[in-house]
Image (spheres, rainbow, N blue to C red):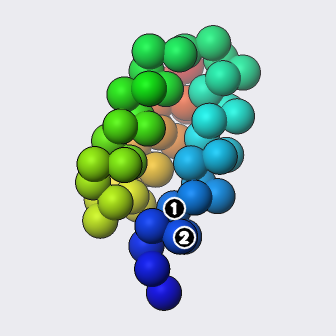
């Protein structure tokens, strides 16, 4: 029901995927975006997927 609780697994998955790519600065920026804008979680997740495909 709560978007923040639903975003926690997504944060962990994003953390693992980006840590494997050794993109620590971008990881921190994406985590800040997720924490500061929990209502935009799905948009941010789509951006993460697009960025991962770009790499």
Residue assigned mark 2: 6
Q: Is the Cβ of the residue at disc 1 closer than 8 Å to that at disc 2? A: yes
Q: Is residue 44 left or right of residue 54?
A: left
Marker disc for residue 7: 1
Identified at 40% across, 42% down, the residue is 47
Q: Is residue 8 above or below residue 17?
A: below
Residue 27 x %, y % = 49, 26
Position in image of residue 34 (x %, y %): 38, 48
Q: Position of residue 53 (x, y in %)?
A: 55, 31
Residue located at (46% from left, 50% from top): 45
Q: Along the horizontal axis of the image, is 15 left or right of 51?
A: right
**Distance from label 1 to label 2 (Cα)?**
4 Å
Q: Residue at x 43, y 73 (%)?
A: 3
Local packing at callout 1 (Cα closer than 10 Å; few below 14, some 14-19, many 20+) is some
Dot 2: element: helix
Q: How many discs appear?
A: 2
Residue 32: quarter of image: top left
Q: Is residue 5 left or right of residue 16?
A: left
Please tell me whether mark 1 sits on a helix, a strand or a loop. helix
Which of 52/12 is in front? 12
Q: Is residue 41 left or right of residue 14?
A: left
Within 10 Å of disc 2 (Cα), the crowding (few <14, some 14-19, many 20+) is few
- Whole-percent x and y of residue 18? 61, 27
**Residue 20 vertical placement versus 38 (above, below):** above
**Quadrant in the picture for the C terminus:** top right
């Amino acid at each position: 029901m709560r978007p923040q609780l639903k975003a926690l697994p997504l944060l962990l998955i994003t953390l693992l995927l980006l840590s494997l790519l050794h993109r620590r600065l971008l990881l921190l920026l994406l985590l800040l975006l997720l924490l500061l804008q929990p209502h935009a979680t799905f948009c941010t997740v789509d951006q993460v997927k697009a960025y991962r495909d770009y790499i």
